[in-house]
Image (cartoon, rainbow, N blue to C red):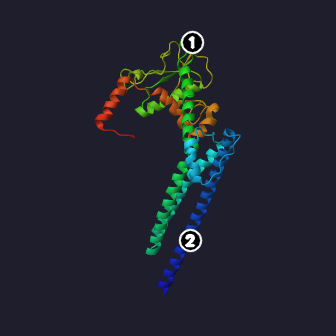
Amino acid sequence: MVGLVEDANRTNAALKQREHHISLIEEKNSRLKEYINELKMEKEKLQIDLNSKNSKKEPPPKRKRVVEESKVQIKETKYFLKPSSLFERTRRRTVNEIKELWYFISAEVTKVNKKTHDIGLKKAVTQMLQDFQNMHNAITINMAKLNSLDGRREWLVKESKELSELVQKRIHYLQNPKDCKSAKKLVCQINKGCGYGCQIHHVLYCFLVAFGTRRTLVIDPTGWRYSSSGWEGIFEPASDTCKSYSGKLGMWSGKDSSDINVLLPTVDKLYPRPPYVPLAVPKDIAGRLSLIHGQPFVWWIGQFAKYLLRYKPKVEKEIRRKQKSLGFKKPIVG
C-alpha cells in the first residue's frame, strides 16, 4: 500500500508540474500574440500614412484580407516609409522573445522527461514539444516576412548602401590629404607579437583612433612577419597620397597633440583610452545606423575593414585559384 501511495503522489506531482509548464507556455504565447498585434497595428498605421501622401483624391481601397494586401504591397510599393525607433526596438525584441521562448520550453520539457518515469507523461510532453516547435517555426517565418513586406527589404539595402558610401567618402578624404607633409598622422606598427587575426584587429583599432582624432593612418610594416614586402605586398595602400611619415615621432598622450606624427601603442598599453574604441559609433549617424543594424558597431568597424583589407590583384587571383583547386564553397567559416 505504501508503494501505491508513493506512486500516486509522484504521479500527482508530475501532473501538477506539467500543468504549471502548460500555464507558462500559454502565458508566453499570449505575450507573443500581443507583440505581433502591436507590430501589425504599427504596420497598418505606417501604410495609412503612406497611402494618404500618395493619394490625396482617392481614398485607399478597402482591405479584404491581410494576405491579399501583402501581395498587393509587394508588387506596388516602390519604397518603404522609414520605420520609427520604437518599431525597430519592438520588432527586434519580439524576434529575441521568440528565440528565448523556444529555448525555455525546450529546456523545461527536457527537465520533465529526465525527472519523470511515467511513460505516458514522457510521450505527452514530447509531443507537446514537437507541436510547439512547429508553432515556433511558423511564427519565425512570419516575423521574417514582416521584415521584408512593403518594400522594407529594399529600404534596408538602400539605406545601408547610402550610409556605407558616406562613411567610405569620409575615410577616403581623411586618408588622402592634399599636403601629406603638413597633415597630422597616426602611425601604427604591425609587428605586434601575436597571430595574423590579432594583428589585423590591431590595425583596425589604429584606424578607428586615427579617424576619431582626424589623423591620416600610416601603417609601419617594419618587421611584419606575414609578408617580406610589407603591408602593400598583400593589400592595396591605405592611402594614395600619404604612405609614410618623416620627422619626429611623438608618443600617445590621449590629448589633441600638436605633433605631426603620433605613434599609437597596442591596445594593451593604451592609456588614457580614447572615446573612439569599441563599441563607439559616430553620433551623427548613430540614429540611422540603429535602424538598419541591431549591433551598430559591427557594421561600423566593418566599414574600416572594407576600406583597409583590399587585396592586390595578384593576391586576389591566387586566392581565387586556391579556392577553385580546393573546392571551397560558400559560406566559408574559419
| Residue 54 position (above or below residue 253) | below
Question: Crowding at label 1, few (<14), some or many (≥20) Cα neighbours within 10 Å?
Answer: few
Closer mark to the observer between disc 2 and disc 1: 2
| Residue 24 position (above or below residue 222) | below
Q: Position of residue 232 (x, y in %)?
A: 41, 21
**Residue sticking out furthest to the left:** 325
Residue at image position (59%, 33%) is 281
Of 115 and 49, which appears nearest the observer? Answer: 49
Residue at image position (57%, 36%) is 279
Does label 2 or label 1 sit earlier along the sequence? 2
Q: CA distance from mark 2 to mark 1?
A: 75 Å
Describe the element under mark 2 as helix, strand or loop.
helix
Residue 146 visible, this orientation: no
Question: Crowding at label 2, few (<14), some or many (≥20) Cα neighbours within 10 Å?
Answer: few
For the C terminus, which image quadrant? top left
Q: Quadrant of residue 330?
A: top left
Instruction: Read off the residue under disc 1.
Output: 182
**Marks 2,1: beta carbons within 8 A:** no
Of 279 and 69, which appears nearest the observer? Answer: 69
Q: Position of residue 276 (x, y in %)?
A: 59, 31
Q: Position of residue 136 (x, y in %)?
A: 51, 57
Q: Position of residue 21 (x, y in %)?
A: 55, 67
Residue 128 visible, this orientation: yes
Which amino acid is tagged 1?
A: Ser
Instruction: Read off the residue under disc 2.
Output: 19
Which amino acid is tagged 2?
A: Glu
Question: Is residue 87 found left or right of 320 in the rendered image?
Answer: right
